[in-house]
Every structure is written in structure tokens, then in C-alpha cells.
Amino acid sequence: MLFRKTSRHPLGSLYLTAVAFIAVVPTFLSHHPLARMVDPNDRQSWNISANGSIPGQNAPIRTVQHSGQCIALTFDDGPHPIYTPQLLYILRKHRVRATFFLTGVQCEKHPSIVKRIAAEGHELGNHGYLHARLDKMSPESVAADIRRADQVIVRITGIWPHYFRPAGGVLTPTVLQAATQTGHPIAMWSVDPRDWVVGRDATAITAVVKDAVGPGRIVLFHDGGGNQPRMLEALDSLLDFLKKQGYQFVTLSEE
Ligand SMILES: [Zn+2]
């Protein structure tokens, strides 16, 4: 017999509850709105210059440089076992390519979806391994987290994720240095419909994008985290709208 019957001692179940709680809470927090509360625009507290750079390091990109009416769609926090395949279906239906900022931990859980994202022509980006609060970590830990995600993505696809996007958009000098050390330019965004806010409906998500979109803009969506059904609902109609407006869709590294 491989497993002995578990103890009936009342503390046994208490212990198991505590272990389950400790195991679940970090995952929950990493996708909880609280994890995104750090304001990337609050440059004073981060001691970052107006364009989000520190001397000797490349400034994060917030737009793509393209001739013509191009925009770049980006999707963070995946791959998700249910919503990423649905997203890939919508993108394929509209013949749109996008950039996916993947977390290493999700890639390890769903490697076949990562392969599919790459195979369907989308660009892969590094969103860290754990989606951790980078502002609470040492420079060595931030660099190690980025490298760990690189290794997972390269192992699964053979593709080096060119851009790094910090979890929660946290841009501290430490994060900027770690990105440079690990060989990644940073990609931020210029349109944020806050699609991850649970309870936010498709109309609200759509309205922000329609209002803020413009040539060269980078749009931030989430295929992991929360509220993805509303994001997908918004995206399907948004792609029709944007195409009628004459937009073409590019990935971040596309020349
Ligand atoms: Zn994220």
C-alpha cells in the first residue's frame, strides 16, 4: 500500500487547511488588484526621470515606431488554459498578430499553449517567472526571476523573448538595471483599458480603447488574471472596429 490512511487527529485537518492557505495566497496575491497598485507613473517615489529611464540604460518603450496606421496589442499574465486558446481563436479569426507577456510559472503549467502562441506567429515576451512584487525584491532576485522565465520560454519554444514587461508595471531603478543585465529592453504600454478589474464590462473596456487608440500605441490586455471573458468579448468587436478605422496590427519587434 503506497499511502497510509491519514490521521483523524483534529489538528490534522487544521494543518492541511493552513498549508493549503499558504500555498494559495501567493498565487492569489500575484493576480490580485493589490499586486497592481504600484503606480508606474509615480516617478517621484521611484526616483525615475520623466521618460522612465536611468542614465546608461535604454528607456522603456511605450509606443511602436512604424510608418502607417499601426498598433500593437499585448496580452499579459498567461498562458491561461481556458482563455488563451479562446484569445488565439479570436486573433486567428481576425488575422491579427499580437505580443504575449508570459509568466514562467504559467508556461511551465501549459507548455503546449506556449508552443501554439509561437506557432501562430505571435511574439513572446518575458513577464517574469512568478509575477512577483519586484519593488520588494533585491536586484539579484529580480534578475534571477527574469532569467528563470527566459529559461522556461526558451526551453519550450527555442525562442528568446526580446522584451521584458515588469509585473504590475513596476519601474524601479532596480527593475531597469535587472532588465539591462539580463539583456531585455522593457516594453510598457500607452493604452490601458484596465480589463483585469473584475466586474468591468466589455463596453467599458471597449470605450477606453476606442478613445485612446492612435497610431503607434501599445494596448495592454490580460489573458491571465481575472475578468478575461469580458476582455475577450470586447476584443472581438474592437478588432472589427479598429480594422474599419484602417489600423494594422504589429508585434512589438516587428520591423
Ligand atoms: Zn502582469
Image (spheres, rainbow, N blue to C red):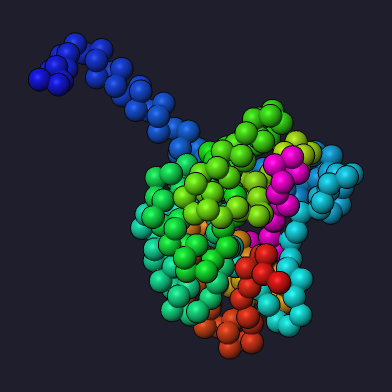
**Does the stretch in magenta take in 189?**
yes
The boundaries of the magenta stretch are 179-194
Identified at 52% across, 49% down, the residue is 153
**Residue 253: % across, % down:** 67, 65
User: Which quadrant holds the C terminus?
Assistant: bottom right
Can you name the residue that lies furthest to the left here? 1
Q: Is residue 41 above or below residue 137?
A: below
Q: Is residue 58 left or right of residue 76?
A: right
Tell me if I can see residue 255 in this picture: yes
Q: Is residue 200 above or below residue 244?
A: above
The image quadrant that residue 62 belongs to is bottom right
The image quadrant that residue 125 belongs to is bottom right
The image quadrant that residue 176 belongs to is top right
Can you name the residue that lies furthest to the front here? 158
What kind of secondary structure does the magenta stretch mostly adopt?
A: loop
**Residue 10: % across, % down:** 21, 13
Q: Is residue 91 above or below residue 132?
A: below
Residue in the foreground of this view, choosing between 157 and 63: 157
Identified at 25% across, 12% down, the residue is 11
Identified at 67% across, 36% down, the residue is 143
Q: Is residue 155 left or right of residue 251?
A: left
Count the labels in the image: 0
Tell me if I can see residue 136 in this picture: no
**Does the stretch in magenta take in 211?**
no
**Residue 218: % across, % down:** 67, 66
Q: Is residue 23 above or below residue 41?
A: above
User: Which quadrant holds the N terminus?
Assistant: top left
Identified at 61% across, 53% down, the residue is 161
**Residue 18: % across, % down:** 35, 22
